[in-house]
Image: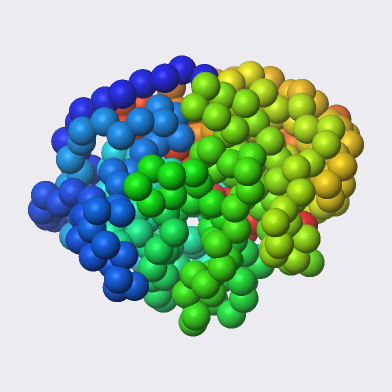
Amino acid sequence: MRLFTTAICTAIAIGLLAGCAGNTASNGTSPLGLSPQLRTAPISVFDDVAPPRAVSVIHSLMLPGKNTNLPKKGTYVSEFDTSSVLGYDANNKGNQGPICAVQGVAFVNDIGVDGQDNLMVPNPGSASSNTLDIHQGPTMCGKLIGSIPDPYGQPSDATSPNAVTGQIAVGNLVGNASTAGSLSICTLKGGCTVNLTNSAYFHVGGVAMSNAGDCWIDVKTSASGGAELVYYKGCAGNGAVASGFKQTYYGGMDIDKSGNLVIIDDKAEDVYIYSGCAPACTVVGGPFALKGESFWGKLDFANNQFTAVDRTDGLVDVYSYSTKNISFIYSYNSGLSASLLPNGVGVNPRSKQ
């Protein structure tokens, strides 16, 4: 893990940028009545601080010739210091630029695709509150279905078998007023009504939810480091700290088709694969070294590829995947910049577990 702070005013220019207007993360009262003084400046998982920065919100981003007949397969990539989530073709060995973009977001860490191919964007840079934005799939960069206010902290990761009709697990990197992070359980219709915590929490990283409705959360345990995995049966209760967990630092996670947890260690820059973790973990693969510094990584539907964003070099790295080996295949970076803190990744369609 390499620690950085930056102060950058940015606006994406990919293809034709039709217009943008300056906007910063609001400290105004949320629709749920969250008082202004409880809102804190969003932070990136890569630096764990809130450097001064301004972000330009894009109102119109045209990608000439690419916004019609968009595919139902692809990869989403977020950059913390930009105002959109970019969509790429599923196979991008030719290093082609984005095919589409989701605008109106800021300070995005990770993104997720649910089991129905809808895009979930934890958006702490929305105008009036922290929100989780749901975009319709399976077509890439689909229309906004709805935004769920998150009154519990800075949303930074999300997962769900069905974000439109079912429960969504939302990881809050930090709580309000820079308190410890948490795991919120939300629905599109009812909002975020349950907030789960544990004494192990300091900052919250990756979140996973099984199709059976269990949750796991990977946490940083103190300001100086440390990591634990916390298991919630039925995504409820006080949570149990997992045993047999090998990570030295927190990171992102996913679930493969065998129900194994695939978890990145951002400090060691490697990946472990675990079975069980309910709460006893058994290592079934790894540690497998990553090519660069990646916090988040996701599996494809077939579970033969694992995609991670190399933040330091501004690359999307694609690996082959099995419990026996995670091996680098190729990278692409068209439309990305390391200075803008590439963070999250979502694969459409995702691993169906």
Q: Residue at x 40, y 36 (%)?
A: 44
Residue 99 position in % (x across, y down): 38, 52
Residue 294 position in % (x across, y down): 54, 29
Q: Please state which of residues 233 and 329 is positioned toward the viewer in this rendering.
A: 233
Residue 311 position in % (x across, y down): 45, 28
Q: Please state which of residues 309 and 149 is positioned toward the viewer in this rendering.
A: 149
Q: Residue at x 18, y 49 (%)?
A: 24
Figure quadrant of the C terminus = bottom right
**Residue 219 quadrant:** top right
Left or right: residue 213 versus residue 196 is right
**Quick check: 82 above or below 37?**
above
As drawn, which residue projects farthest toward the front? Answer: 199
**Residue 102 quadrant:** bottom left
**Quick check: 301 above or below 78?**
below
Residue 186 position in % (x across, y down): 54, 69
Q: How many marks?
A: 0
Q: Please state which of residues 273 and 64 is positioned toward the viewer in this rendering.
A: 273
Q: Residue at x 35, y 31 (%)?
A: 49
Q: Residue at x 38, y 68 (%)?
A: 149
